[in-house]
Structure formats: C-alpha cells, structure tokens
Amino acid sequence: MWQITRARRTVAAASLAAALAFTLSACGEDGNRSANTVAGQGSESGQGDDRARQPKEPEQPEKPDDSKVIATLQGADGISLDVTSATRDSGGFVTVNGVIKNSSDTEYFGTDFWTGPELALQKGAGGGSLGGASLIDKAEKKRYYTLRDTEDRPLTTLGLSSIKPRSENRVFMQFPAPPKSTTEVDLQIPTFQSASLTLTDA
C-alpha cells in the first residue's frame, strides 16, 4: 500500500493548473470555504482556505524515515496514525508521511470517512483515502486542504478500502505550504483526534 512514487510528482504538477479554478468554485460548496478564504483571509476559528496558493512541483523523498514518530493521531476502533515527517519542500509544498496502524483484531472498514464529505473529492478518490485531511495554521488563521489533480484525485494515499487487523500501512498527504514564518500546524483528519506538527525544511 506504499504509494510514494515518482508518479506522484507528475500528478502534483497536473493538479496545479486546475487548483485556482477549483478554489473559486468550492466557495459555494462549504460554509467554511467562504469568499473571505479565497482572498486568503482566515476566520477566527482557523477555517481559512489557502488552496488558491499553488506552489511549484514538490520534491518528495522516495524513502522517508519511519523510525522517528513526531506525532500520533488516535482514531476509532484501534486505528492510529503515527506521523513520521512533515516536510516543507522548496517548491512550496508540505508533505506529511506516516504509518496507519490497526492495533485491533478486527478489520477496519471506516476508511471512506477519511476522504471527507465533499462529493467531488469522494468521486475522485474512488474510495478510502486521506483526501479529507487538512493543516491548520493557527497563527495565520488558515486551513490548508490536500492538493488534488484535474480529476479531483487528492494527492494522498488512495485505495484504502480497509485496514487489516494488526497491520501497518505507510501513507502520505500533500498540502500547499504555509508561510515560512509558520513552523507549527495542526493536522486534522476525519474520525481522528488532531495533533500538532512541527514543519521541517527539506
């Protein structure tokens, strides 16, 4: 299920062309994605949407180090996510790598919730994914959603139909990078508790 490959860079580049148009159209879909967020103005609750800022192609390491856990998000029914890196690339992307674990003896089938409630994203992901993840920049009062390509496929691990019992699954997510002055963000994923991440430079 390890999906961090060179193909992701090609998908990332293709996503940039449609991202601005998506940002404008998304304003009518979600109350949290209002006209203020398109202008880059965050709300007091940190709900700003900065998908309009589209950086260059990311420089994603091929083999992230899984030995160091920088944060853990607890999910439902024995599911957890150990975040192993949150890296700001020179092209203006943040790539979050981690390992999803199922510590229970029961297969977990709630992965569709991780894609989030947006219908276009659900269709693009085609099932369980981490497309519903977001980074919260409390200092700038902005929310950064996962990047996506022109067919609304999120630039995250896809194909998460279920999580096998006692299994570990390497995953990734890519977001627009917040300003360099921001060094800490909160990672939020549906059904998981949020956790703070310290951003490092590639």
Image: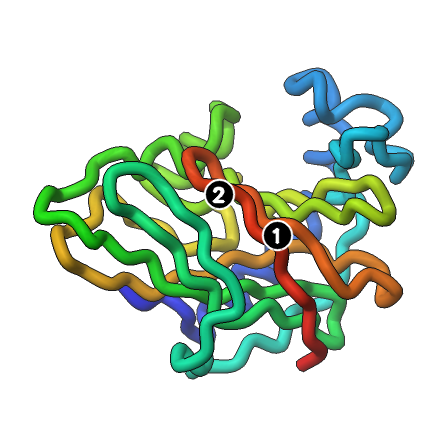
Which residue lies under the disc numbered 2?
131
Identify which residue, 198 or 146, lies in the foreground. Answer: 198
* 147 w.r.t. 34: above or below: below
Tell me how far mark 2 sits from mark 1, CA to CA.
Answer: 14 Å
Residue at coordinates 40% horizontally, 81% vertically from top-left? 67
Which residue lies under the disc numbered 1?
15
As shown in the figure, which amino acid type bears the numbered disc 2? Answer: Gly
Q: Position of residue 72 (x, y in %)?
A: 45, 58
Mark in the foreground, 2 or 1: 2
Q: Position of residue 69 (x, y in %)?
A: 46, 71
Identify which residue, 43 or 3, lies in the foreground. Answer: 43
User: Could you classify mark 2 by the number of other residues whose Cα lies within 10 Å: few (under 14), some (14-19), or many (20 or more)?
Assistant: many
User: Could you classify mark 1 by the number of other residues whose Cα lies within 10 Å: few (under 14), some (14-19), or many (20 or more)?
Assistant: many
Tell me if 189 is positioned left or right of 30 in this view. Answer: left
Q: Position of residue 148 (x, y in %)?
A: 57, 47
Residue at coordinates 45% horizontally, 51% vertically from top-left? 73
Q: Position of residue 175 (x, y in %)?
A: 64, 55
Identify which residue, 106 or 5, lies in the foreground. Answer: 106
Residue at coordinates 41% horizontally, 62% vertically from top-left? 82
Q: Visible in this render: residue 31?
A: yes
As shown in the figure, which amino acid type bears the numbered disc 1? Answer: Ser
Quarter the N terminus occupies: bottom left
Number of marks = 2
Tell me if 114 is positioned left or right of 196 in this view. Answer: left
Q: Visible in this render: residue 148?
A: no
* 121 w.r.t. 59: above or below: above
Question: From this viewpoint, which residue is outermost toward the left?
Answer: 105
Tell me if 132 is positioned left or right of 56 in this view. Answer: left
As helix, strand or loop, the secondary structure at mark 1 comes to helix
Colour convention: rainbow
Residue at coordinates 47% horizontally, 31% vertically from top-left? 116
As helix, strand or loop, the secondary structure at mark 2 comes to loop
